[in-house]
Image (spheres, rainbow, N blue to C red):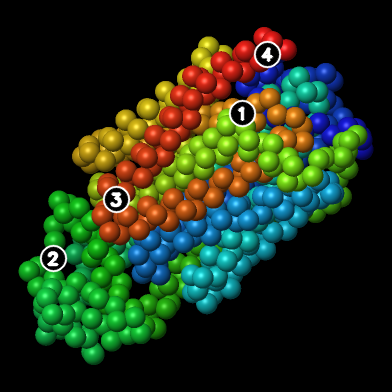
Amino acid sequence: MSDGNETTDQFDPYKPGVSTGTPKVKDIDKGTGIVPKKYLLPFILTTCCFSLWGFANDFTNPLVKVFEQVFIITTSQASWLQFAFYTGYFCMALPAAFFIRKFTYKGAIMVGFLFYAIGALLAIPASMTATFGLFLLGSYVLTYGLAFLETACNPYILSMGPKETATQRLNLAQAFNPIGSLIGMFVASQLLAPNLLVTDFQKDIKEGNPEVVKYLIQDEANLPPGATLADDGKSFVLKDDLNTEVNLYSEGLPDYDTEVGALGAATTNAMKVFRETEPEAFAEFQQADLGYVRTPYVVVAGVVLAFLGIFAFSKMPVFKSEQADAPFLEITARIFAQPRFFGGVIAQLFYVGAQIMCWTFVVHYGMEYVGLTLAEAQSYNIVAMVIFLLSRWICTFLLRIFSPGRMLCGFAIGGIVFTLGAIYLPGYTGLMSLVMISACMSLMFPTIYGIALNGMEEEEAKLGSAYLIMSIVGGAVLTKLQGGMIDDYGVRFSFWLPLACFVVIAIYGFLTFAVFEPRAARESASA
């Protein structure tokens, strides 16, 4: 095991002599290359963590729609899943940073694995008891682990070699994050969604299967026992603990191919009557679907525990700083006094919110406005991720030509244009416009990260990184808000919220190239 001074460098696209280009894999085994030989195994093990948190992030997004259908809840209620998931980052990022300051990166990673596994395994009691709240708790605890992993792994990777290649080293490690994301999306769209009974249930409604259509009440004479007709005569109230209201299709069933949202509404209404009239059969139905949800969590928990064991018995480098860090409050005051950092935290909060909203509710958009199944709608998320990856490679090249601020502003404006397309364009055209937003989002997270931390001292960058990870809470708050907007105003209208996020990011990009970058150039020239 090799010991050395701790070198928690920052992701800095401005640093002279440091290429932001994507490194070649063959460089990782050169003694003086991106990853020195003595750090090769620790680098590989740490890089695997990037894929593990990528899986968790992108397996969670489609579960909002799954839980909405299986638990028969509103989009706003189902969005508590994302709220719980991304609030965990906010709550644990700073404790993770304090842990690293006191102990080691390896220790923080192992704690992260432990939280990750515990959160994933909570899916077992949650599914067996059909308790949505336990799924929320599991997601919250799981992201405690992700906060530890992300707070530790990024600076740990930067420390494993020369400062001159730190950015390239981080880029190489980050290239493995989308692999986990794609696996999570694939599991959700190809292994989970097609096997759900609720998917077949909705298909049967669309095809007019009498075994399912019987739950769509068309005559008040056939109301379920105890149900009462509402005053408007267009709905009835079930005799359950929630006084659930259900549509009465007295004028006949809708045309699912032409009426937006009609199929989803009919599925929900039929599920409510199914639950009320055949509770035992519904419980078996629900248990079967939650069992499908449980399996990926159990598998990934096993993988994470295996990595915990591997890390426990592996020799990992320990980096200790020669000087003690300044007090926490002193560093915090210094970094938040810098407009580019404070603005970066705000911009990152809105970016993460926009990303999670677009990748979560593309499923709702595809199902309600294009008439896709859950699996088909989720497949467009995979298309969005592929576009995201390709665009990131292109942006890596373009950043050698254009300044980060100009790129950020330009791509945010592109995001605004595509979001307007998702709001106003019809059918598949609107859906593809929504998918293309991912091309514009591809450079935003690392670029905002780099702009915000540019020019910081080592101790400032370490704490600044934790605050930037805390800003991931935007994915919790804004996604929950959009879920409520979907319930009240519809999917299309709700995308005004991501559009507002891109406006904030565009302003930050403009300030960067109009104010921050010229100021940095003047300071560099006078130094």
Kind of residue at badge 4: Ser
Q: Is residue 250 left or right of residue 246?
A: left
**Of marks 4 and 2, which one's residue comes earlier in the chain?**
2
Q: Residue at x 57, y 60 (%)?
A: 139
| Quadrant (top left, top right, bottom left, bottom right) of the N terminus | top right
Residue under label 3: 491
What secondary structure is found at the residue carrying circle 4? helix
Displayed quadrant of residue 161: top right
User: Does residue 311 appear in this view?
Assistant: no
Looking at the rendered image, the disc whose residue lies closer to the viewer, 1 or 2, is: 1
Instruction: Assess disc 4: are there few (<14), some (14-19) or many (≥20) residues with their C-alpha within 10 Å of its C-alpha.
Output: few
The residues bearing labels 1 and 2 have C-alpha atoms spaced at a distance of 55 Å
**Of marks 3 and 4, which one's residue comes earlier in the chain?**
3
Q: Residue at x 57, y 32 (%)?
A: 339
Looking at the rendered image, the disc whose residue lies closer to the viewer, 3 or 1, is: 1
Using the image, determine if residue 254 lies above or below residue 464: below
What secondary structure is found at the residue carrying circle 1? helix
Residue under label 1: 450
Kind of residue at badge 3: Val
Q: Is residue 80 left or right of residue 311?
A: left
What secondary structure is found at the residue carrying circle 2? loop
The residues bearing labels 2 and 3 have C-alpha atoms spaced at a distance of 22 Å
Residue under label 2: 253
**Of marks 3 and 1, which one's residue comes earlier in the chain?**
1
Displayed quadrant of residue 51: top right
User: Does residue 104 appear in this view?
Assistant: yes
Kind of residue at badge 2: Leu
**Direction left: furthest residue:** 251
